[in-house]
Every structure is written in structure tokens, then in C-alpha cells.
Amino acid sequence: MNQHLRPEPVPFIDIGAQRLRLGQAIDDAVGRVLTHCQFINGPEVTQLEAALAAFSGARHVVTCASGTDALVMVLMAKGVGRGDAVFCPSFTFCATGEAVALAGATPVFVDVDEATFNMEVNSLKRGIATARRLGLKPKAVMPVDLFGQSADHDAIAAIAEAEGLFILDDAAQAFGASYKGRRLGTFGLATATSFFPAKPLGCYGDGGAIFTDDAQLAETLRSIRVHGQGSDKYDNVRLGLTGRLDTIQAAVLLEKLRIFDDEIAARNKVAERYARSLGNIVTVPRVTEGNTSIWACYTIRLPKGTDRAAFAASLQAQGVPSAIYYVKSVHMQTAYAGYPVADGGLPVCEALSSDVISLPVHAYLDEPTQERVIKAVRDALT
Ligand SMILES: *Cc1c(COP(=O)(O)O)cnc(C)c1O
């Protein structure tokens, strides 16, 4: 094919377009930090925590250095460690299980629901029994709100309550989404999110936050993020981390939060168009009645027998990128092969890994570009 006739490649996520829109506002926000020089614990950090609390409805927000730290810090604060079992879906980014292992506890992987890609409650129940059989102490459930859609929080809460487990929601991909009219950040004991640049609300580096209504937990988390510091600066009362969010990142996030609702609406428009135009040829993602998704990923399932590599190559030839989240569920990856899975295995996680593929989705994908993506998918399948 003649290189010059190739269409411009479509960006998978377009951080540059958002940067253009924010323009001088971001430069000014960063400039203010460069002027006051409080690079750690500057006023923007406190402002951001208040803004995130207002946005989510959570009483306390503790910002931190990454989404992974957000998960680890809650497990540390709750004293989760050796001999404890924490239940995680396996069809997720590795950090979900990694945080449990870093805390010294055992991740027990459970299966997901075929329609929503989120934790499946019967497998969760089996996983709890598996953990007991292995002599582990069931301690916590970590649902993931995968690809931007809330997990089934009511069903998970009912099991957690019956079993005496606390819930740490991994909303790294879904901050901004809601479940039965309430925004994520208010389900379970605590919610963790990530501000990695590619997440729906991303900063210009690494960052994360923890949301909770528990004042005691929030206080412990504030200590953990500064090496476990106590009221006496020279007497650290527990183990902690260098777990803080930089002031510059907080300043960036404050500007991005102002346009976040508008971006959420734009992402939903893209997802609606994809669903209308592709729903008859591939399995498009389904949002459960009463939920909203923030569309961190637009993940379709290809019809049985489709050669996924050839499909991706066909898209690529038309300048349309794609990605496979996740080629391997966490329990199938080398570092996690030694951890238990729920009795009955994880057949849905394994089936999804073989036929999912994610299409470009972001708030700046204009209609002609959406049509290009749609046409590329149709062409690749016919
Ligand atoms: C991105 C992500 C994390 C980790 O966030 P980082 O900020 O990259 O540490 C955790 N869980 C899930 C589901 C994620 O997608």
C-alpha cells in the first residue's frame, strides 16, 4: 500500500487533545506551584482532596502516590497480612492482586461475570470456602470496577457482611462512574483509584487516592503515607511509605476535575455510537440497568472463530489501534501462579482472555473518527 494514502492513525487515548483544551489553565496551575515551591503537601493537595470528596460524596479523601499504593495503604491500615485471604477478580490489571501480595496476604482469585466482566458472586462464595479449606483467614473483598463500570456492589456487600469481610473497592478504572445513582467512592469500607495518565481522570505522572467515610481509617492512612508518622514528628508509630501525591499533580488534577463531567458525557456518546453501530456484529459491552460506565476501555468480544490477531492487523492497516485487556488473567501470570483460585476454576476469565479486544475511546474522539473505527471493525469482519 502507498504510505501516502494511509489515513492518519487514530490515537488510542488522546491526552494531547485534552492538553490543548485545558491550555493556559494548566500552565497557570503548575506555575503557581513553581512560585510557592511547596512541592510536597502544598495547598493544592488539600484543595484537591476537598474537591474529590465533594465530587464523589465520600467523607474523607486521602491522595497518594499511585493507585497501587492506594490499595496497599488500606490493606496496611487494616493490618491485613500473613495468613489472611483477600478475594480479587482475576480478569483485571495485575496491581489488584499485587497489592494483596505486597501486604503479605494471599490473593484468592475469583471468576467474573460474562456480561459485565466484573466479580461474579457465586465464585466469590466458592473462593471464601476455598480459602477456609486452605487454612487461610478470609479478611477482605476487593471488587474491581473494570473498564469503567461498577461491580455489583450490593450483592458483594451482602456476602461480605455475612462473612465478616471488609470491602476495598478497586475503582482505578472507574472513578466518576456510579452504581444505583451513587458515585463510586462511597461503597464498602474504602475505595482506591489511580490518576495514571491513561485512566479516565489522569494526572501528568503517577498519582492515586483513597475514599472512605471512616475518620479513623483516614487518619491512619494519612500517617501511613508519611512513613507511619505519629503526632511527634520524630516518633514514627507504624510502618508506612513515601506515599504522597506531588503538589504539581494535585494542581493538574484540580484543573482536569473541572472538565471531568463534560468528558464523561463525551465518552458516553462515543460508547453509545459504538453500541448502535457494532452491536449486531460483535458482543458490545453491556452496562447493567442503574449503573453508569466511564468507559476507561471499550472492550468488545469477537464472534467465535474470529482470528483476533488478523482482526487487529486489519484495524491497524486502517490506522485504527486496538489493545487486548487482558491477554492473561492475573492468576495465569508467572508471578501469581502460586496463589489459589476459587474452587470450580475461573472459566470465564480464561474465555474472555481469548476473544476480547479494546477499541479507542476518549472524550476527544470526534464523530468522523468514530465512524472510521466503526468502518474498520465492520470491514475486518466481512
Ligand atoms: C491502573 C490500575 C491499578 C493501579 O494503578 P497505578 O496508579 O498504576 O498504580 C490498580 N487496579 C486497576 C484495576 C488498574 O487498572
Image (tube, rainbow, N blue to C red):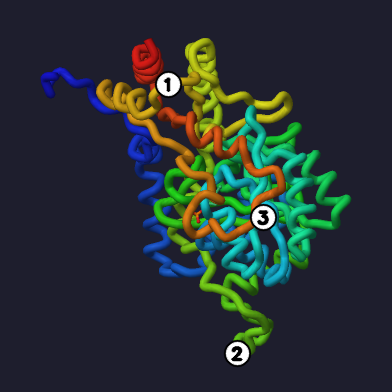
Q: Which mark is residue 108?
A: 3
> In terms of sequence position, does the residue under pointer 2 or pointer 3 come before the other?
3
> In terms of sequence position, does the residue under pointer 1 or pointer 2 come before the other?
2
**Residue 184: image x %, image y %?**
68, 43
Placement of 188 over or under 139, stated as above or below: above
Residue underneath mark 1:
306
Q: Secondary structure at mark 1?
A: loop
The image quadrant where one finds the N terminus is top left
Q: Which mark is residue 111?
A: none
Amino acid under disc 1? Thr
Amino acid under disc 2? Tyr
Amino acid under disc 3? Val
Placement of 378 over or under 285, stated as above or below: above
Question: What residue appears at the point 72 percent right and 35 percent down from the top-left corner?
Answer: 179
**Residue 109: image x %, image y %?**
64, 50
Q: Which mark is residue 234?
A: 2
Separation of residues labelled 3 and 1 (CA atoms): 32 Å
